[in-house]
Structures are given as structure tokens and as C-alpha cells.
Amino acid sequence: MKLDIVISGVGGQGSVLASRALASAGMGIGLDVRTSEVIGMAQREGSVTSQVRLGEKLYGATIPDYEADILLGFELAETVRALPKLKPGGAIIASASAIVPVSVQLGISSYDQEAMQHYLREQPGRVVLLDLDELAKKAGHPRTGNVIILGALSTLPDLPFAPNQLLQAVLSYIPEKLHNTNRRAFEVGRQAMEVA
Amino acid sequence: MTLKLLMGNEAIAYGAIEAGVQVATAYPGTPSSEVLSTLAGLAQEKGFYAEWSVNEKVALEVAAGAAYTGARALAAMKQVGLNVASDPLMSLAYIGVKGGLVLVVADDPGPHSSQTEQDTRLFARFAKLPVLDPATPSEALEMTKYAFDLSEQLLLPVILRPTTRTCHACQDVEIQDKDAEPKKISGFQRSPNWVIFPNLSARKHVWLNGQQEVARDSFENSPFNQLTINKQTDVGIIACGVSYNYVMEALQLTGLEASVLKIGTPYPLPAVPVLKLLKHAKKILVIEEQEPVVEDQVIALAWKNRSAAQISGKNDCLVPREGEFNVNKVRQILESFYGGQLEQPVQVAASLAPELPLRTPVLCAGCSHRASFYILKEAARGNDTLFAGDIGCYTLGAMAPLNTTDTCLCMGASVSIAAGLSRVEPHRQQVAFLGDSTFFHSGIPGLINAVHNGANITLVILDNRTTAMTGHQPHPGLNRTAMGPTDQSINIARMVEACGVEFVQVADPFDLKAALQVAKDVLAYDGPAVVIMQRECVAQIDKGRHRRINPELCTECGACIDELGCPAIGKPAGSPEILENCFGCGFCSQLCPVGAIEEV
């Protein structure tokens, strides 16, 4: 058994929490786990990637190119940026919305949201693009995008852990007063996959 | 025994606690910071002392003093921090310690967030101190515990050198449920051996050189070095630290055969496992990030033992000396080494990927540094002004549209670089920026130097009341320490006055009009002058009132976007708008020439 997951997004979106939750869910069922996160130098608003590896015998924490089984994208362009990590036919669950960086406002670079969505939909594996802003409203909190995507992930076949094991791992990283909101977010993510 | 998901830096902290550490010190720096923040969080409960020291030199000296008594001590820093601590380190190798002293120095190949890619293993060799290089968080924990024992056995500080991919990787790590038995401390005992006179140094140098062989001997049977002989092949690979992970995975992916020697103790390199491998393998490849520390020692061992093995690595340019490795890079190295084409990873090429937007880190929405940079630029308008920057979040002042950082070298350098520039180019206005934590770290001597020698510079201290970039550690200007609250905080303005600066001003960067006037006054002053721009870091305070742009008043001049580059101002529908992530600092509304930005 081996499961490599890449999480990409923008600093401040909660990718570290997501990778820790996935790792502890894997740990809970007796797997070897590794995560690798980029932490440091003013990460807010910058591109960030977390990597999670679950398996029987693991070495390093970073996933080789074209080896990840699943790509979770918290932001649209960052999902495209992380695509070279995904194996051909790997699953993608990502936000369809854009966080437009300052460089675009200043005219130094450009962001074509439609082209990004189109490119992702062309990928050979299962591709689900979620209206994360809308779903977060449904969950009742704008900053639950990470948990919504984990909920969506929990519906994929052949995962080593049960959905509830992942949910419990998520909640173990969140203060108790926010448990209900995050339970709702997880469920919203699961439901979104039924219609996707 | 409990299994816990730990980051490498946390694992090091737990290792130190299991070894019974009594004094832990550090100055924060990525990727090392979480070692001490983890220790500080557990210090009260476990009954030891932890501090954020003013800089790395001080951190090492405090740890050394503690170790002189027989207590176990740890000092943590990043690789460039070791440069600051190198003065005590070099002498401490001669003097030695009594209690175990572990120096954790985190290296940052890449680099991800450092000025250099320097290799601390090489520094260890230079200082003649043993060094351990963990491949995983769980190995980091074991090595930390062992390092304390080794330090007491050798009477020398021992360096633990993790890299980013161990520091910031998480793993399921076994930790002990029982606390370490408190160690009996014999206390500091007076002896001429603690006083480094030249005649003592001369004797101690001989001793230190002898300890290299003692250290090597203790590494000969170390579990941190592992040799796996593969009889199917005459190829041997030696891999150090995290490179071992990449080698094992690349071998698996390619199906190539090799004997593998994993090295966890790169200096002094044990001879026995290397010679065993040399006996078996005719072709050796050494894979290690950064400098050829292991490779050079392997070559020397092979030469001394008349081995005819071919040794490849950095000496024949097969393995790069720069950058961080990964499985893909190691795979390519193996391909060149084994010869012939290996099967390449499949390239996904459905269609050409769309052009990606640049997403470099930027100052947060509501960051007061943005306001300070804007104010200084405005105050200096019309004059030929150079801006010397420093290390911190505010190095991002170099980015468009602020463009207010012309130089950045190392911690605390801005004020002295500005002074140096002023000696040759007195006709240009010289402005230096320093953060509050950086001011205490190493900015003060530069400021005293500028005052005493009469340099005509302006120093702007960007005081956001925290060490922001590395995770909000305290510094001497604050009323908290690693252990909790304190009333011993040092007032920066009074400190600046005590340095002899005659023109000192404090301003609020979010009061544009007043702060701009202060900035103009300070720039106009003949001689060294200081302005302290004081505003708390946005990560430490609650949001203010959201702003919005009144479309009836907005002339779409674009000043709010083009001058500030705030991530909370954009044009999602074509005209400027304040976005959801507005922090409510209100600076943009003061800047808008037509007053179109208002409180919600």
C-alpha cells in the first residue's frame, strides 16, 4: 500500500493542517507516514505545497515528480503549478476559484482563470473542480476550504482510512468550539462529490 | 512509548528532553526555529530553562556556561546563525565542556529561505567538532539523545545538522512516556583550563586533534551508519543524511542494483564501513548535498589504503555542489553513473499548460512595513537616495512596487552598509532599515559605530513588536520571554539615545501625514538620525474596520494599487476594489488623492 498526496495552495489557506490531518489518519491505522511542508519566509500569499506520504515502508518526505496519486488544490493556478507532481491518471480535487496575486494587479503577470480550468479538465484522471467559495458559505465559515476538500477526498475509492477516521484526525487539530462548523464543512465536501 | 506525529524540529526537542536537557537557547531562523519553540512550550512542565537569546553568539555562550557546570545544554540556530556564533564555537572546541552540549544547526540547501547554502558539516570539520546528519525526524530524535552522551564522552560540543527536509518533515516518531531522570550536577569547578590563554590553547590544540580520532572510533560501530552489501553488483553508493532517502527511492524506481552505505556521522568519517565497501565495490558513487565532506574523506581513505576503486561524485562533476536534491535529481545522477538510458518518468502533455501567474511572497495586507517604505520613499522623493535593507519580512521591500531595498547582506548589516556607502558617496542620501529583533541581534554595534565615527545616515527601525518572519518569537524589546511574561523589556528609543544618537523620533506609520513629516525631518538632519516606525505586526492583532472604494468618487487613477501593492486591493471587475482580505489598516484611504476609500 502506498498513497502519495500533494496539496497546493496559497499561504494561509490551511494546507499544513490538511497534511497533518491526513498523516495522523494514516498513523491511526498503523501506516508509516511522512509530510513535507514549506514553512518560513513570509509565506502568506505565496505559493505553498505540502506533501503527504502513507505506506508500509517509507524513506523521504518529498514525492518524486509524476508519482503522486492525488492532487488537492486549494487554489486554481496553484493546482496547475503542482500538476507535474501528479502521476498520469491521478485524481485531482481542486478549487475552481482564483486568488489573484499582486503581480497580476500590477500588470507584471497574468491569470487566465478559464484557461486554467480548461487545462485541468483535460487531464486524464478524475478531475473535480469545486466552487469552494460557495461551498464554504454553505458550511458557514469562509476559511473551511481545506476541510471541504478533505471531505471531498474522503469519497474517493481505495483510501486506506475510513471517512470518519479522516474527520476525527481533522478535528484533533481544531479547537473544540469550531468542531461543528468543520464537521459541516467535511460533509459539504462529501456531498459536493456526489453531484460532481 | 507513544507514537506521535512530529516535525523534525519537534523530534529534536523531544530528544533533548529525553536526554535531560537543562538549559536550551536559540535565536530563531528558518528552518531551525521550532526546536526552541517546542522546548520553550514544555520547559515549565518538564522543569528546565529555555530562552530566546538576543543572537546566536549569545545563545551558544549561555549554553556553554551551563555546560561548564556539568548540566546538559542545547543551542539551536540556522546555518548563517552559526557564522555569528563562530567566535565562541572555535574557542569552545579548545576549551571543551563538562556537561553535554549539543549545537543544533539547521542547513538550508536550495536555499529556501537563507542567504547562503553553506554546509555546516564543513564548518564542523573546520572547528574540529563531530557532526551528525539525520535523514528523518525519528533519526533526529535518536541522534539528539546520542549527541549528549557523545559530548560528555569527548568533552566537546557535538553538532547536529539537520536540513530543511528533516526539520520541516513530519513522521510517526516514538517518544518516551517517562521523563528523564534528573542528572546530578557537580557544578562549576575552578581550573586554569577554563581560561583560554595562548599556552593553554597550544596544549589544547594537541588534545583537540587527538579527540578527532576518539570521535572517529566511537562512530565506527554507530547504528547511524549502515552498510548493505549487494553481491550482484560491484557498484557501491555512499549517501549522507537525507540523500540516503533519495538514493533508496531512486534505486527502487529504476530497479538498479548497488551496495549502499548510509552515513549519519559525516565527520569524522568512520573508516571501517567505508573500507568494507571499498573491498567489495569497484565503482563508488558518493551522493551528498552541498560540499564533498564525506567524499573527500572517502578519497583520502581509499588513497591511504591503496584501494583502486573508482570514486565518483563531486570530484568528477557527476554530483552537483549546489541546490537541494530530490529523487528525480538523484535518478539522473544514477543514470549518468551507470551509463545508458534509463526509462524516463512519463511526461503528461495533454496540451501546453497555461501561463502561470507569478506568486512570490508579499507583505501581508495591513502590514505596517508597506506604509513605512512608502513614507520613506515619499520623504526622499527628489533626492538621490539609497536604501540599505536587512533580514526580516521587510526584505520584501525590495519587491515592486515598493522598490525600497537596494542592498541586503546579512543580519544587522544595513546600518553599516549605509555608513560605508556614505563614505564614498556623501552626495547621496543614505537610509538603512532594521527590524526590532534585528536591531537587538546585531544592529546596535553598527549604530554605535556610525555615531562615534560621524556617519551621515538615517536609520529606520521597523518596530512591529515581534520577530515576525520566523514565527513571532519574543525579543528584548518585549514584555515576554520564552518562559513567560517579564517586566524587563528594553525601550528601543532609549537604547538608541544611549548609543549617542541625538536625533531620535518615534512615528506611527499608519498616520501618513505625521509620519511623513517625521521622515522628512529625520532625512534633513545632518548626522546620524533614527526614526522608529512603531506598529504591531498584523499577525498579532485583530482586524480593523474593512475599507471599500466609493465608485462615485474613484477616478481609477490606480494609485492605491500601483503605489502599495497590497494583496487586499485588486481589480476583479476592472476597477479598483478592496477585497475580502482587507485588514482595515486604513493606510490606503489616506493615500487616495480623491478620498474615495472609506470605512465600511
Image: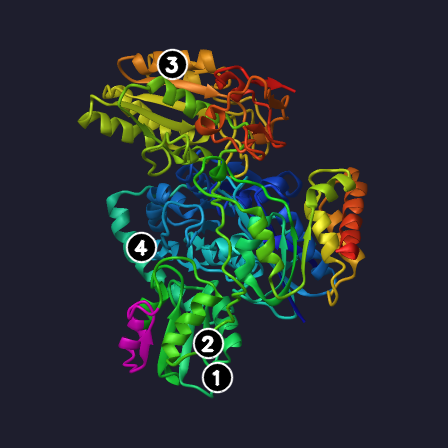
Residue labelled with disc 4: B126
Relative height, residue B145 to residue B515 (above, below): below
Q: Are marks 2 and 1 in contact (CB under 8 Å)?
A: yes
Residue labelled with disc 2: B260
To which chain does the residue with label 4 belong? B
Which dot, 4 or 2, sits closer to the camera?
Answer: 2
Which dot, 1 or 4, sits closer to the camera?
Answer: 1
Quadrant containing the C terminus of chain B in the rendered view: top right
Q: Residues within 10 Å of mark 2 (few under 14, many from 20)?
A: many
Camera-side residue: B433 or B586?
B586
Camera-side residue: B442 or B152?
B442
- For the residue labelled by badge 4, is the local secondary structure a helix, a strand or a loop? helix
Relative height, residue B585 to residue B287 (above, below): above
Camera-side residue: B285 or B95?
B285
Quadrant containing the N terminus of chain B in the rendered view: bottom right
Magenta segment boundaries in residue numbering: B299-318
